[in-house]
Amino acid sequence: MTDNKTLFIDGMEVEFSDEPNLLEVIRKAGLNVPTFCYRPDLTSFGACRMCVVEIEGRGIQSSCTMPPEAGLKVHLNTDRVRKIRKTVLELLLANHKCECLTCDKSGNCELQKYAMEYGITDIRFPKLEKEDYLPVDDYNPSIVRDPSKCILCGACVRACSEFQGHSVLGFVNRGSNTRIEPMNGRFLSQVDCVFCGQCQAVCPTGALTIKSSIDAVWEKINDSTKKVVVQIAPSVRVALGEEFNLEPGENTIGKIYAAARRLGFDLIFDTNFSADLTIMEEANEFVQRLTKGEKLPLFTSCCPAWVRYLETQHPELLSHLSTCKSPQGMLSPVLKEFLPKYYEGYKKEDIVVVSIMPCTAKKYEAIREQLINETDFVLTTKEFAKMIKAAGIDFRKLKEEEANSPFGQYTGAATIFGASGGVAEAAVRTAYNMVTGEELSNVDIKTLRGVDAKSRTKDLVVDIKGTSVKVRVVSTLKEAEKSLKEIKAGTSDFHILEVMACPGGCVNGGGQPISCSDSSIKEKRAEGLYEEDRNLEFRRSHQNPDIIKLYNECLGGKPGSEIAHHLLHTTYSDKFKGSYKDI
């Protein structure tokens, strides 16, 4: 354990130990300085110069790149410091497409926030004119890129490189012509972007935003000829409340059901139900592969960014990918196929399925050629929050309600899907039962848990009646690439590989409320899911009474049946990186 040392911030003695930079020491002391480029989970870049402080004997320094030292005397708001920050803000605003009233980031824009805090009411420099605006890239289903709102902080470049190892975005040109864009000025739909949305999650302005489906969903809700049903993903329940000033990790699923009914959705379902369904099919698939000793390791297929990464970068490994659709991909066809069986007046052709997801890549998944016409619209957590606010609903005062049946009950195994390691943990709970006919004695497999940067790769060996099954869990595609290299080299020894593209899993998805400035937020969200798991009556997917009913009444009585395979499984296609075909 590192011994604590002290320094001084505005005359106050402050202890520090292993903080990576002065900025973290300042924040730990309950103070702050503004920054655009600094994100705790990314390397320090020192590009924006907003976090400058004045240090006695050292002059002006950027606090995000300077290591703390004992005895430093740091001043946060001297005249020099404030003048530098205000000048930086003016220069950024002068070169910024200022459309605050109509910008999707309005209210959550850090440039807007600091301009107000520092009282910027006039800009001394020539302003960007409309004829200088660069073209907007909105030719993909997930992300809108407006380069005229970019402040060159580089956070998106680092997120793409450090999380995904992909470097879809990069700096081009020099001097005043410097820009951030995909290779050769292409659209995001023309390069190997996986649409994870981490770039827009770390973007401090409106340069990268989520492509909205809100108006299209409202149109369907107000169409009396349609039956609009909604499904809500596991991790939405522990993040949506943040948009209404509730604590990260607070489970608001009962309020979410209520809000969806107030918005006018005809029926409310929980994607947790189909997460249990996914486990039934995936565990069955794994047991069959393990028995035959082929196509191992099995790759989980819940993350559409991971699926697209394999299709574009490693198509030769697609046979390892589970043929199971994601929980979103399973529930949508189940609802369209079987709701008419349980609800009078429902016709397959009139059912519109909307899903509320933590993930921008789910928008891409919904238009995959293999899944088209199943999920009609995908709203991210943030989009759903906007709809609630626009409808004048006081979310905090809503009384909790229940989802509709017969696809309403879910287990704790489904809930933990939202955290890295959750899919693998849920699969082990059920695969053990399928092989042995017995229940795993301890379902809390804590070795597979953890959403911080230190636990992006986790290994576990499970003894299934004498058969050792090794499970590997990774989050971020950069970590996944290391495991793929092991497989190609013939040195891998794991049987299951769970991959989530977003660091920490879906709790930190690109469509969730912004959490990039506080690493602990995703940990609180994950704990909220594990808490629900602990408190539910059933904690194993194969125990879900509604799942058992669905198999018996609609899906041929067992996982892997002909109808189950038809509705719940999919195929993949080679989208090798050399082709650069549009989506």
Image (cartoon, rainbow, N blue to C red):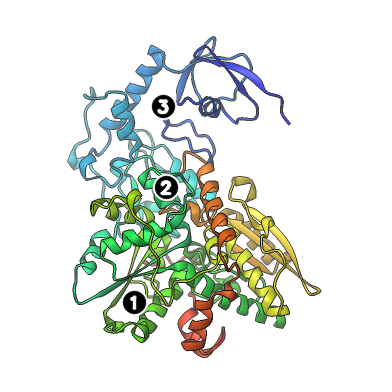
Seen in the picture, residue 177 relative to 427 is either above or below; the reply is above
Say which of 272 and 115 sits in front.
272
Badge 2 density bin: few <14, some 14–19, many ≥20, Cα 10 Å: many
Q: Is residue 369 above or below residue 232?
A: below
Q: Secondary structure at mark 1?
A: loop
- Looking at the rendered image, the quarter that the C terminus falls into is bottom left
Q: Name the residue nearer the viewer: 384 or 43.
A: 384
Which residue is most to the front?
399
Residue ID at (66%, 82%): 288
N-terminal-most mark, 1 or 3: 3
Residue 503, percent across and down?
Answer: 54, 51
Which kind of residue does numbered mark 1 sit on?
A: Asn
As rendered, which of 560 and 398 lies closer to the eye? 398
- Residue receiving disc 1: 373
- The structure residue drawn at horizontal position 38% and vertical position 55%, both measured from the top left corner, is 381
Regarding residue 50, the answer to whether it shows in the image is: yes
Left or right of 471, for residue 336: left
Vertical side of 231 occupied by 57: above or below: above
What's the residue at 68%, 60% (across, down)?
445
Disc 1 and disc 2: Cα gap in Å? 28 Å
**Looking at the image, is mark 1 or mark 2 earlier in the sequence?**
2
Measure how far apart labels 1 and 3 are at the Cα level. 47 Å
Residue 539, which numbered label?
none
Residue identified by numbered label 2: 201
Where is mark 3, residue-wise? 50
Residue 143, quarter of picture:
bottom left
2 or 3: tag closer to the N-terminus: 3
Residue depicted at 53% across the width and 62% down the height: 415
Secondary structure of the residue carrying tag 2 is helix
Local packing at callout 3 (Cα closer than 10 Å; few below 14, some 14-19, many 20+) is many
Residue 427, percent from left and from top:
62, 69
